[in-house]
Amino acid sequence: MLHFTNVRALLLLGLIPLLVWRYLRRVKEGDGSLLFGSTIAFEGVHQPWTVRFRHVLFAVKMVALGLAVLALARPQKGTEEEEILTEGIDIIVALDASGSMAAEDLTPHNRLYVAKHVVRQFVEGIKHDRVGLVVFAGKAFTRCPLTLDYGVVLHVIDSIELGTIEDGTAIGSALATCLNRLRESKARSKVVILVTDGVNNRGEVQPLDAAKIARTLGVKIYTVGVGTKGTARVPVRDPNYGMVYVNMPVEIDEASLAQIAGSTGGIYYRATDRQSLEKIFQEIGRLEKTRIEVKTYTHYNERFLEFLLPAFTLALMGTIAAYTRFQK
């Protein structure tokens, strides 16, 4: 869309109707006629084309004048550009892969399967934020450092299996591993999402000590306890009967998990089924929004030559014609 910088110049367009009116009036006044008794003598006499199109020269001048006025008004065409400024979040998910995550109380499969599926959905919905993954049981390991390559994160999530790490639940070690990855982070917000179904029983780092360090580093911890209440069916390999299922009590240290989250500004959640776990991650996603600022810039390009050159061309043609073929 054209934008005129010198809008006042457009007022000069009002001269064109006045000039046209003045021209027509002069033509009418100067078009005198002689009275003849008979016009037979003039039959068959044709006016030359220069006379019949004598108004063309004036029209060309008016068009040239109009274009010149438009050029004087400095027409510009704007191009909008958007600059998106983001302040991303660094998020590390610490996922429990201990033997108890084999419990099949979160349909349609075991706890680890459902947790992997929900974490995968969570990562797929992330934009502009770096994501990392720590997996723990009796020990904790960084399976994926902080990255914007979400495809890599998803691949790592899919590869997590039970029984690949010494059994146990080292919650403190898992948090310490996450904090080690986040301590050099320059992100506006640093978040750990801890997903576990048990009680800390391994590792040298106490979970509450790790929470204190997290608070010092400005890291917010969300804790999620996974598992139904009461007992859960867990597959166990029996030397005589092979794989059998036994009901085992669900032991989640909710008090410690709530204290860890609360001391760092996070929230503790309890997921007793797949739907509640999905809602928990959706809520965390809403709480930890990336701040996005969109600035719009409009760049204007001068377009006066598109009017000035035709105006000059028409004026030149009119001048040449005035002194050649259109002379009276």
Image (cartoon, grey):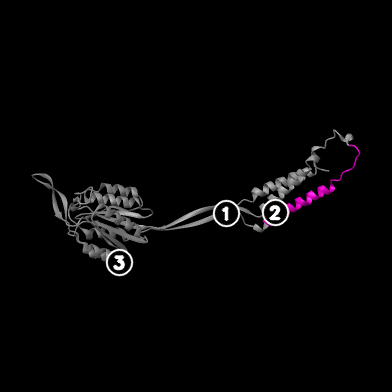
Q: CA distance from mark 1 to mark 3?
A: 49 Å
The residue under label 2 is 13
- Asked whether, in this view, residue 124 is left or right of residue 48, the answer is left
- 192 and 288: which is toward the camera: 288
Left or right? Give the position of 163 relative to 122.
Answer: left
Q: Residues within 10 Å of mark 1 (few under 14, many from 20)?
A: some
Q: Mark 3 = which residue?
A: 216
The part of the image, by quadrant, that contains residue 213 is: bottom left
Q: x, y (%) of residue 135?
A: 24, 53
User: Looking at the image, which residue sits at the far top?
Assistant: 44
Is 16 colored magenta in this rendering?
Answer: yes
Residue 72: give its label: none
Mark toward the viewer: 2 or 1: 2
Q: Which residue is mark 1?
A: 300
On screen, residue 310 versus residue 110, left or right, reads right
Which is closer to the viewer, label 1 or label 3? 1
Give the CA separation, mark 2 to mark 1.
Answer: 24 Å
Q: Position of residue 252 (x, y in %)?
A: 19, 59
Q: Position of residue 44 (x, y in %)?
A: 85, 33
Discs 1, 3 touching: Cβ within 8 Å: no
- Give the camera-side residue of 96 and 282: 282
SS under mark 1: strand
- Taking 203 as reference, is 57 above or below it? above
| Magenta span of residues | 10-38
Residue 316 lies within the magenta run? no
- Amino acid under label 3? Thr
User: Given the image, on which type of amino acid does mark 1 rest?
Assistant: Tyr
